[in-house]
Image: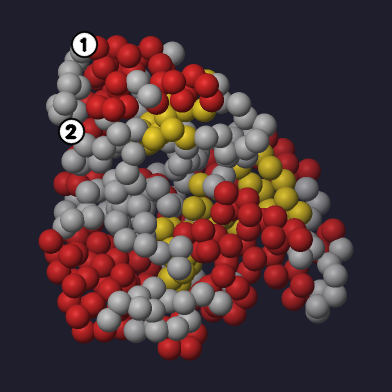
Protein backbone atom coordinates (compact mmCIF):
# COMPACT_ATOMS: atom_id res chain seq x y z
CA UNK A 1 0.00 0.00 0.00
CA UNK A 2 1.70 3.17 -1.25
CA UNK A 3 -1.36 5.46 -1.29
CA UNK A 4 -2.49 5.74 2.32
CA UNK A 5 -2.02 8.83 4.48
CA UNK A 6 -1.57 6.73 7.63
CA UNK A 7 2.08 7.73 7.69
CA UNK A 8 2.84 6.25 11.13
CA UNK A 9 0.78 3.08 10.82
CA UNK A 10 -1.49 3.93 13.76
CA UNK A 11 -4.83 2.86 12.30
CA UNK A 12 -4.72 -0.53 14.06
CA UNK A 13 -2.69 0.32 17.13
CA UNK A 14 -4.13 -1.66 20.08
CA UNK A 15 -3.95 1.26 22.55
CA UNK A 16 -5.88 3.50 20.16
CA UNK A 17 -8.45 0.80 19.41
CA UNK A 18 -8.94 0.19 23.13
CA UNK A 19 -9.42 3.90 23.89
CA UNK A 20 -11.94 4.20 21.03
CA UNK A 21 -13.95 1.16 22.12
CA UNK A 22 -14.01 2.28 25.75
CA UNK A 23 -15.29 5.75 24.85
CA UNK A 24 -17.94 4.30 22.50
CA UNK A 25 -19.19 1.90 25.18
CA UNK A 26 -19.46 4.71 27.73
CA UNK A 27 -20.71 7.61 25.59
CA UNK A 28 -22.12 6.19 22.35
CA UNK A 29 -21.02 6.98 18.82
CA UNK A 30 -22.87 10.11 17.71
CA UNK A 31 -21.92 13.78 18.08
CA UNK A 32 -23.73 15.60 20.88
CA UNK A 33 -24.13 18.96 19.15
CA UNK A 34 -22.02 21.95 18.11
CA UNK A 35 -19.00 22.68 20.30
CA UNK A 36 -20.37 25.98 21.63
CA UNK A 37 -23.56 24.37 22.95
CA UNK A 38 -22.90 20.94 24.42
CA UNK A 39 -20.53 19.21 22.01
CA UNK A 40 -17.35 19.56 24.04
CA UNK A 41 -16.39 17.01 26.68
CA UNK A 42 -13.32 16.29 28.76
CA UNK A 43 -12.10 14.15 25.87
CA UNK A 44 -12.13 17.15 23.52
CA UNK A 45 -10.45 19.37 26.11
CA UNK A 46 -7.70 16.80 26.67
CA UNK A 47 -7.14 16.51 22.92
CA UNK A 48 -6.90 20.27 22.48
CA UNK A 49 -4.42 20.53 25.35
CA UNK A 50 -2.23 17.75 23.95
CA UNK A 51 -2.17 19.35 20.48
CA UNK A 52 -1.37 22.80 21.88
CA UNK A 53 1.53 21.26 23.79
CA UNK A 54 2.73 19.41 20.70
CA UNK A 55 2.69 22.62 18.65
CA UNK A 56 4.07 24.74 21.52
CA UNK A 57 1.14 27.14 21.42
CA UNK A 58 -1.03 28.58 24.17
CA UNK A 59 -4.24 27.03 22.91
CA UNK A 60 -5.87 24.81 20.31
CA UNK A 61 -9.29 24.70 18.68
CA UNK A 62 -10.76 21.52 17.23
CA UNK A 63 -12.66 21.58 13.94
CA UNK A 64 -14.62 18.87 12.09
CA UNK A 65 -11.96 18.56 9.36
CA UNK A 66 -8.72 20.13 8.27
CA UNK A 67 -10.63 21.74 5.40
CA UNK A 68 -13.04 23.45 7.79
CA UNK A 69 -10.13 24.53 10.00
CA UNK A 70 -8.55 26.45 7.12
CA UNK A 71 -11.92 28.00 6.24
CA UNK A 72 -12.42 29.09 9.85
CA UNK A 73 -8.95 30.64 10.09
CA UNK A 74 -9.06 32.55 6.82
CA UNK A 75 -12.62 33.85 7.27
CA UNK A 76 -11.84 34.93 10.83
CA UNK A 77 -8.73 36.77 9.65
CA UNK A 78 -10.65 38.37 6.82
CA UNK A 79 -13.44 39.51 9.14
CA UNK A 80 -10.95 41.72 10.95
CA UNK A 81 -11.32 44.18 8.06
CA UNK A 82 -15.02 44.65 8.79
CA UNK A 83 -14.31 45.18 12.47
CA UNK A 84 -11.67 47.82 11.78
CA UNK A 85 -14.21 49.62 9.56
CA UNK A 86 -17.02 49.41 12.13
CA UNK A 87 -19.12 47.25 9.83
CA UNK A 88 -18.70 49.47 6.74
CA UNK A 89 -17.32 48.18 3.45
CA UNK A 90 -13.53 48.38 3.74
CA UNK A 91 -11.50 50.28 1.18
CA UNK A 92 -8.62 48.53 -0.57
CA UNK A 93 -6.14 49.95 1.93
CA UNK A 94 -8.31 48.74 4.83
CA UNK A 95 -8.59 45.16 3.55
CA UNK A 96 -6.35 42.30 4.67
CA UNK A 97 -3.60 41.41 2.19
CA UNK A 98 -3.19 37.64 2.00
CA UNK A 99 -0.14 36.17 0.24
CA UNK A 100 -0.63 32.55 -0.78
CA UNK A 101 1.70 29.98 -2.36
CA UNK A 102 0.56 28.99 -5.85
CA UNK A 103 0.37 25.29 -4.86
CA UNK A 104 -1.48 25.69 -1.57
CA UNK A 105 -4.20 23.21 -0.66
CA UNK A 106 -7.72 23.68 -2.00
CA UNK A 107 -9.04 24.48 1.49
CA UNK A 108 -6.71 27.49 1.68
CA UNK A 109 -7.68 28.63 -1.81
CA UNK A 110 -11.41 28.30 -1.06
CA UNK A 111 -11.06 30.08 2.28
CA UNK A 112 -9.38 33.03 0.60
CA UNK A 113 -11.97 33.12 -2.20
CA UNK A 114 -14.81 33.14 0.30
CA UNK A 115 -13.20 35.99 2.26
CA UNK A 116 -12.79 37.85 -1.04
CA UNK A 117 -16.50 37.45 -1.76
CA UNK A 118 -17.25 39.19 1.53
CA UNK A 119 -15.01 42.04 0.36
CA UNK A 120 -12.57 41.63 3.24
CA UNK A 121 -9.29 40.59 1.61
CA UNK A 122 -7.02 41.08 -1.38
CA UNK A 123 -5.12 38.00 -2.51
CA UNK A 124 -1.58 37.91 -3.90
CA UNK A 125 -0.34 34.55 -5.22
CA UNK A 126 3.42 34.03 -5.26
CA UNK A 127 5.26 31.47 -7.35
CA UNK A 128 5.70 28.13 -5.65
CA UNK A 129 8.25 28.45 -2.83
CA UNK A 130 9.76 31.49 -4.56
CA UNK A 131 10.90 33.73 -1.72
CA UNK A 132 12.23 36.42 -4.02
CA UNK A 133 8.81 36.77 -5.61
CA UNK A 134 7.11 36.83 -2.21
CA UNK A 135 9.56 39.43 -0.90
CA UNK A 136 8.87 41.59 -3.96
CA UNK A 137 5.10 41.33 -3.52
CA UNK A 138 5.33 42.18 0.18
CA UNK A 139 7.62 45.13 -0.52
CA UNK A 140 5.35 46.56 -3.22
CA UNK A 141 2.15 46.10 -1.23
CA UNK A 142 0.99 49.31 0.47
CA UNK A 143 -1.69 47.62 2.56
CA UNK A 144 -0.98 47.70 6.29
CA UNK A 145 -2.25 44.29 7.38
CA UNK A 146 -0.45 41.39 5.70
CA UNK A 147 -0.84 37.62 6.08
CA UNK A 148 1.27 34.86 4.52
CA UNK A 149 -0.27 31.39 4.32
CA UNK A 150 1.39 28.23 3.04
CA UNK A 151 1.39 24.47 3.29
CA UNK A 152 4.40 23.36 5.28
CA UNK A 153 4.66 20.11 3.28
CA UNK A 154 2.93 20.19 -0.07
CA UNK A 155 0.59 17.26 -0.46
CA UNK A 156 0.98 16.68 -4.20
CA UNK A 157 4.68 17.26 -4.83
CA UNK A 158 6.03 16.28 -1.42
CA UNK A 159 8.34 19.28 -1.07
CA UNK A 160 8.76 21.47 2.00
CA UNK A 161 7.99 25.16 2.23
CA UNK A 162 11.22 27.17 2.80
CA UNK A 163 10.44 27.69 6.48
CA UNK A 164 13.70 29.40 7.44
CA UNK A 165 13.40 31.94 4.63
CA UNK A 166 9.73 32.54 5.48
CA UNK A 167 10.68 33.20 9.09
CA UNK A 168 13.26 35.75 7.93
CA UNK A 169 10.70 37.48 5.73
CA UNK A 170 8.29 37.59 8.67
CA UNK A 171 10.89 39.49 10.68
CA UNK A 172 11.46 41.86 7.76
CA UNK A 173 7.82 42.57 6.87
CA UNK A 174 5.95 41.81 10.10
CA UNK A 175 3.19 39.71 8.55
CA UNK A 176 0.92 37.21 10.28
CA UNK A 177 2.29 33.75 9.47
CA UNK A 178 -0.17 30.88 8.95
CA UNK A 179 0.86 27.35 7.99
CA UNK A 180 -1.05 24.19 7.14
CA UNK A 181 0.74 21.25 8.76
CA UNK A 182 -1.65 18.58 7.49
CA UNK A 183 1.13 16.34 6.16
CA UNK A 184 3.86 17.38 8.58
CA UNK A 185 2.20 16.92 11.96
CA UNK A 186 3.36 13.85 13.95
CA UNK A 187 5.79 12.82 11.17
CA UNK A 188 8.40 15.59 11.23
CA UNK A 189 10.26 17.21 14.09
CA UNK A 190 11.96 15.55 17.04
CA UNK A 191 8.70 15.32 18.97
CA UNK A 192 6.39 15.06 15.98
CA UNK A 193 5.56 18.77 16.14
CA UNK A 194 5.75 19.03 12.37
CA UNK A 195 7.78 20.84 9.75
CA UNK A 196 7.99 24.01 11.86
CA UNK A 197 9.70 21.99 14.61
CA UNK A 198 11.91 20.22 12.05
CA UNK A 199 13.28 23.59 10.91
CA UNK A 200 13.21 25.19 14.37
CA UNK A 201 10.65 27.82 13.31
CA UNK A 202 7.83 27.13 15.77
CA UNK A 203 8.05 30.54 17.44
CA UNK A 204 7.75 32.26 14.05
CA UNK A 205 4.39 30.63 13.27
CA UNK A 206 1.31 32.51 14.50
CA UNK A 207 -1.39 30.02 13.55
CA UNK A 208 -0.83 26.36 12.75
CA UNK A 209 -3.61 24.39 11.07
CA UNK A 210 -3.48 20.61 11.15
CA UNK A 211 -5.50 17.49 10.53
CA UNK A 212 -6.09 14.28 12.46
CA UNK A 213 -7.03 12.25 9.37
CA UNK A 214 -3.50 11.47 8.21
CA UNK A 215 -0.66 10.49 10.55
CA UNK A 216 -3.03 10.44 13.54
CA UNK A 217 -5.25 7.92 11.71
CA UNK A 218 -8.47 9.51 12.95
CA UNK A 219 -10.64 12.34 11.64
CA UNK A 220 -10.88 16.06 12.35
CA UNK A 221 -8.87 19.27 12.14
CA UNK A 222 -7.31 21.68 14.60
CA UNK A 223 -5.90 25.18 14.90
CA UNK A 224 -2.98 25.73 17.30
CA UNK A 225 -2.60 29.38 18.21
CA UNK A 226 -2.70 31.94 21.03
CA UNK A 227 -5.62 32.12 23.46
CA UNK A 228 -6.75 35.40 21.89
CA UNK A 229 -6.80 33.92 18.41
CA UNK A 230 -8.71 30.87 19.64
CA UNK A 231 -11.42 33.05 21.18
CA UNK A 232 -11.64 35.16 18.05
CA UNK A 233 -11.95 32.16 15.70
CA UNK A 234 -14.57 30.66 18.02
CA UNK A 235 -16.67 33.78 17.48
CA UNK A 236 -15.95 34.35 13.78
CA UNK A 237 -15.07 30.99 12.21
CA UNK A 238 -18.40 29.91 10.78
CA UNK A 239 -17.21 26.46 9.68
CA UNK A 240 -16.39 25.85 13.34
CA UNK A 241 -19.46 27.51 14.87
CA UNK A 242 -22.05 25.78 12.70
CA UNK A 243 -20.61 22.26 12.70
CA UNK A 244 -21.10 19.41 15.14
CA UNK A 245 -18.25 18.46 17.42
CA UNK A 246 -16.42 15.21 16.80
CA UNK A 247 -18.06 12.19 18.47
CA UNK A 248 -16.46 11.25 21.77
CA UNK A 249 -14.92 7.97 20.47
CA UNK A 250 -13.12 9.90 17.71
CA UNK A 251 -11.85 12.47 20.19
CA UNK A 252 -10.61 9.61 22.39
CA UNK A 253 -8.96 7.93 19.39
CA UNK A 254 -7.24 11.16 18.36
CA UNK A 255 -5.96 11.81 21.87
CA UNK A 256 -4.61 8.27 22.06
CA UNK A 257 -2.89 8.79 18.70
CA UNK A 258 -1.15 11.93 19.97
CA UNK A 259 0.07 10.02 23.02
CA UNK A 260 1.30 7.03 21.00
CA UNK A 261 3.02 9.22 18.41
CA UNK A 262 4.89 10.99 21.22
CA UNK A 263 5.84 7.80 23.06
CA UNK A 264 6.91 5.84 19.96
CA UNK A 265 9.37 8.05 18.05
CA UNK A 266 10.70 4.96 16.27
CA UNK A 267 7.74 5.29 13.92
CA UNK A 268 9.07 8.58 12.59
CA UNK A 269 12.49 7.00 12.20
CA UNK A 270 10.97 4.13 10.23
CA UNK A 271 9.37 6.58 7.81
CA UNK A 272 12.82 8.00 7.11
CA UNK A 273 14.24 4.52 6.61
CA UNK A 274 11.52 3.71 4.06
CA UNK A 275 12.36 6.94 2.24
CA UNK A 276 16.05 6.02 2.10
CA UNK A 277 15.29 2.48 0.93
CA UNK A 278 12.92 3.68 -1.76
CA UNK A 279 15.46 6.19 -3.02
CA UNK A 280 18.18 3.54 -3.08
CA UNK A 281 15.97 1.15 -5.06
CA UNK A 282 14.62 3.64 -7.58
CA UNK A 283 17.25 6.35 -7.84
CA UNK A 284 14.56 8.99 -7.37
CA UNK A 285 15.51 11.80 -4.92
CA UNK A 286 13.09 11.76 -1.98
CA UNK A 287 12.77 14.58 0.56
CA UNK A 288 9.61 13.56 2.43
CA UNK A 289 7.19 10.69 2.89
CA UNK A 290 5.34 11.89 -0.23
CA UNK A 291 6.87 11.11 -3.61
CA UNK A 292 5.46 12.63 -6.79
CA UNK A 293 6.24 10.71 -9.96
CA UNK A 294 5.47 12.88 -12.99
CA UNK A 295 3.89 10.86 -15.80
CA UNK A 296 2.62 13.56 -18.18
CA UNK A 297 -0.68 13.55 -20.05
CA UNK A 298 -3.86 12.00 -18.61
CA UNK A 299 -3.73 9.29 -21.28
CA UNK A 300 -0.18 8.24 -20.33
CA UNK A 301 -1.03 8.32 -16.63
CA UNK A 302 -4.11 6.13 -17.06
CA UNK A 303 -2.13 3.67 -19.17
CA UNK A 304 0.64 3.55 -16.59
CA UNK A 305 -1.89 3.08 -13.81
CA UNK A 306 -3.18 -0.03 -15.56
CA UNK A 307 0.26 -1.58 -15.70
CA UNK A 308 1.55 -4.40 -13.55
CA UNK A 309 3.49 -2.04 -11.31
CA UNK A 310 0.28 -0.60 -9.85
CA UNK A 311 -1.31 -4.02 -9.55
CA UNK A 312 1.64 -5.08 -7.41
CA UNK A 313 1.83 -1.88 -5.36
CA UNK A 314 -1.30 0.13 -4.65
CA UNK A 315 -0.49 3.62 -5.98
CA UNK A 316 -3.00 6.38 -6.65
CA UNK A 317 -3.21 8.56 -9.73
CA UNK A 318 -3.28 12.25 -8.82
CA UNK A 319 -5.09 14.75 -11.01
CA UNK A 320 -3.69 18.29 -11.36
CA UNK A 321 -4.74 20.83 -8.73
CA UNK A 322 -5.41 23.57 -11.28
CA UNK A 323 -7.33 23.42 -14.58
CA UNK A 324 -4.42 25.07 -16.40
CA UNK A 325 -2.10 22.16 -15.62
CA UNK A 326 -2.03 19.21 -18.01
CA UNK A 327 0.52 17.20 -16.05
CA UNK A 328 -0.63 14.19 -14.09
CA UNK A 329 1.38 11.98 -11.79
CA UNK A 330 1.43 9.20 -9.26
CA UNK A 331 1.40 10.16 -5.61
CA UNK A 332 3.38 7.62 -3.59
CA UNK A 333 3.42 7.75 0.21
CA UNK A 334 5.64 5.77 2.56
CA UNK A 335 5.15 4.70 6.15
CA UNK A 336 6.73 2.40 8.72
CA UNK A 337 4.87 -0.65 7.40
CA UNK A 338 5.32 0.00 3.67
CA UNK A 339 7.76 -2.81 3.06
CA UNK A 340 10.16 -2.42 0.17
CA UNK A 341 10.81 -6.16 0.27
CA UNK A 342 7.30 -7.40 -0.43
CA UNK A 343 5.94 -8.78 -3.70
CA UNK A 344 8.73 -8.26 -6.17
CA UNK A 345 10.21 -4.91 -5.14
CA UNK A 346 13.86 -5.83 -5.61
CA UNK A 347 16.86 -3.78 -6.52
CA UNK A 348 17.39 -4.17 -10.23
CA UNK A 349 14.09 -6.00 -10.67
CA UNK A 350 11.74 -5.23 -13.53
CA UNK A 351 9.39 -3.18 -11.32
CA UNK A 352 12.18 -0.89 -10.22
CA UNK A 353 13.25 -0.34 -13.84
CA UNK A 354 9.73 0.47 -14.93
CA UNK A 355 9.34 2.95 -12.12
CA UNK A 356 12.53 4.70 -13.21
CA UNK A 357 11.29 4.95 -16.77
CA UNK A 358 7.98 6.45 -15.74
CA UNK A 359 9.66 9.09 -13.64
CA UNK A 360 11.96 10.31 -16.38
How many marks on residues? 2
* Viewport quadrant of the C terminus: top left
Of label 2 and label 1, which has the lower sequence position? 2
- Tell me the number on the disc at residue 287: none
**Percent coordinates x, y for residue 345 in the rendering:** 20, 22
Image point 26% across, 37% down: which residue? 1
Residue underneath mark 2: 339
Secondary element under disc 1, as helix, strand or loop, is: loop
Residue 327, given in percent of the width and then of the height, sits at 56, 25
Residue visible at 27% across and 62% down in the picture: 258
Marks 2 and 1 in Cβ contact (< 8 Å): no
Q: Nearer the viewer, residue 3 or 137?
A: 3
Foreground residue, 76 or 313? Answer: 313
Q: Quadrant of residue 219?
A: bottom left
Residue at image position (17%, 65%) is: 17
Q: Is residue 94 above or below residue 292?
A: below
Q: Report whether residue 31 is seen.
A: yes
Q: Quarter-wise, where is residue 88 in the image?
A: bottom right
Residue that lies at the very extreme toward the bottom in this rendered image: 37
Residue 347 lies left or right of residue 37; in this view the side is left
Q: Which mark is residue 348?
A: 1
Helix, strand, or loop for circle 2?
A: loop
- In this rendering, does residue 175 appear at all? no
Judge left or right: residue 199 versus residue 353.
right
Packing grade of label 1 (10 A; few <14, some 14-19, many >=20) is: few
For residue 286, side relative to residue 116 (left or right): left
- 95 to 135, vertically: above or below: below
In the image, residue 114 sits, relative to residue 149, either above or below, namely: below
Could you say where residue 297 lies in the image, as x and y percent from the top left?
A: 55, 21
Position of residue 320 relative to residue 43, above or below, is above
Amino acid sequence: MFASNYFLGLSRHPAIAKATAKAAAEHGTGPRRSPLICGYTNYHIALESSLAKLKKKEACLLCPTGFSANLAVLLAIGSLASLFCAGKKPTKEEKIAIFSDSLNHASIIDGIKLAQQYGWVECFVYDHCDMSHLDQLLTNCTMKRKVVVTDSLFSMDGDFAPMVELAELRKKHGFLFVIDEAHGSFVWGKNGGGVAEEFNCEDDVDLCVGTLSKAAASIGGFIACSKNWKQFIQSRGRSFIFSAAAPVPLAAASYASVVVARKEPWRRMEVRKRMQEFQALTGIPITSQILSIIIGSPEKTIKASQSGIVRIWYICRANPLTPSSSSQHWKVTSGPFCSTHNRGLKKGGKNTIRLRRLSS
